[in-house]
Image: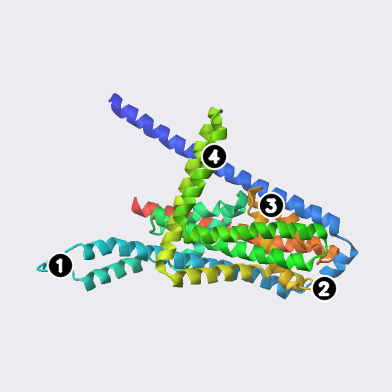
Amino acid sequence: MGSERGTDESSNDEAVGGKLNALGGRRRRFLLLFISISISIFTLLLLLNLTTSRETFIALGQVNPIFLLLAFLIHIFALTIWSLRLKILSDFVSERRNSAKFRPARENHNHCNCGVCMSGEAVEKQRRRRWKRQRLKFSDSLKIVFASLFGACITPSQFGGEPIRIYLLNKKGLSVGDSTVVVFGERVFDFFVVMVGAFLGSLFLWHATSSAILKAFCMFFGVVFCVGVVAVTFCVSKPESVCGVFERIFSAIERFAERSSRGRATLKRVRERAFQELENFCAAVVAIREEGRKVILFALFLSAALWTVDFCIPSLILLGLNAPPVWLFSFAAQFLLLVLVALPTTPGSSGVAEIGIASLYANVVGMHILGVFTLLWRLVVYYLNLFIGGITSLFVLGELKACERVRV
């Protein structure tokens, strides 16, 4: 009797603890959302206050809404390209995993004089049927990408989107390890495209500007991005060597942290997390590289298309405001801005993104429309993501709860 009462009390405590954790997580999300939106609105109001004049209202009367609508549609199209890339990488990893499961049975087993086991063709057909059942539907890929936008909008460096995609891919049939490989594969392709684009963008801005300060700025970041391209190429070609490089770095840091017990404990946690992420990175690179050139080239093409389409948005907004679109400048500036907002500063990079794009376009856009331009750009690339991500997250959570009820 006493043991049953103790079991009931422990289960009640676990239930209460789970509810408190869920409530704490909900409060934290709302706090991050509130901070992100507050910083963004404050920065936008400040820019509008500094740049609004009589010419601003005249320009607003000449707005072409077709280009503004096209900017919103172009952004949704870019998200669609992202969903296609996620589906291709997910299907590849799933197919590769099924091949590994069925291959040992075919290669190591002697089928001679065996009337029980299946033939090689039957095994291949079974593997194909299994793979087709596990393939990610394009509609599910869209929902996964859209749902991850909300987490990205309320976390620094937009890091909150990755765990959501891993979780939802796992719910769609992939293992946690395979889901991590897919998401880290996305990061590899994005990082390579952004580094190359940022390097070319810094060269373009260095030639286009006459300011000595901006030239020095572009030269410095051009060198940084060039090193980044070389580093990515090295990591892709020899992912196993990356762990050795980080091992030497942490060994050197440990010598300085030996005197402090707190420093050693912190370094140990950082080291474990870093090597865990490195293992995921190497697994993603090796998995994608084994498929050959087709998947790599197609994923690189989709990554380049994704950012190319999304970087058309500022030029379309400028056309809507009857201003010169400055296409080449927009592409060069946004690659640099993308690197800037990737730094872990504020939730959703609020404030940093607004000030960054206003600073980059201050010399090519009339001051009277700079605040309006920044507001419209942020509406497309941030508030639209926040709205789509929030709605889709509620829809996906409802689906998951319904599936849990059916299982019970």
Q: CA distance from mark 1 to mark 4?
A: 55 Å
Name which residue lies at 73% across and 60% down: 218
Q: Is residue 201 above or below residue 403?
A: below
Numbered disc 4: secondary structure:
helix
Which numbered disc, 2 or 4, marks the residue closer to the eye? Answer: 4
Image coords of residue 394 (percent x, y): 52, 55
Amino acid bearing label 3: Ser
| Residue closest to the far left | 113
Q: CA distance from mark 3 to mark 2?
A: 29 Å
Q: Are marks 3 and 1 in contact (CB under 8 Å)?
A: no
Quickly name the residue at label 1.
111
**Looking at the image, which is closer to me, 252 or 149?**
252
| Earlier sequence position, callout 2 versus callout 1 | 2
| Residue closest to the far top | 2
| Earlier sequence position, callout 3 versus callout 2 | 2
Which numbered disc, 4 or 3, marks the residue closer to the eye? Answer: 4
Image coords of residue 146 (percent x, y): 54, 61
Amino acid bearing label 4: Ala
Quickly name the residue at label 4.
252
| Earlier sequence position, callout 1 versus callout 4 | 1
Name which residue lies at 22% across and 65% down: 106
Residue neighbourhood size for the residue with mark 3, other residues' Cα within 10 Å, grouped as few (<14), some (14–19), many (≥20): many
| Residue closest to the far right | 54
Amino acid bearing label 2: Gln
Numbered disc 1: secondary structure:
loop
Residue neighbourhood size for the residue with mark 4, other residues' Cα within 10 Å, grouped as few (<14), some (14–19), many (≥20): few
**Looking at the image, which is closer to me, 197 or 39?**
197
Image coords of residue 235 (percent x, y): 50, 57
Name which residue lies at 87% across and 69% down: 58
Numbered disc 2: secondary structure:
loop
Quickly name the residue at label 3.
350
Quickly name the residue at label 2.
62
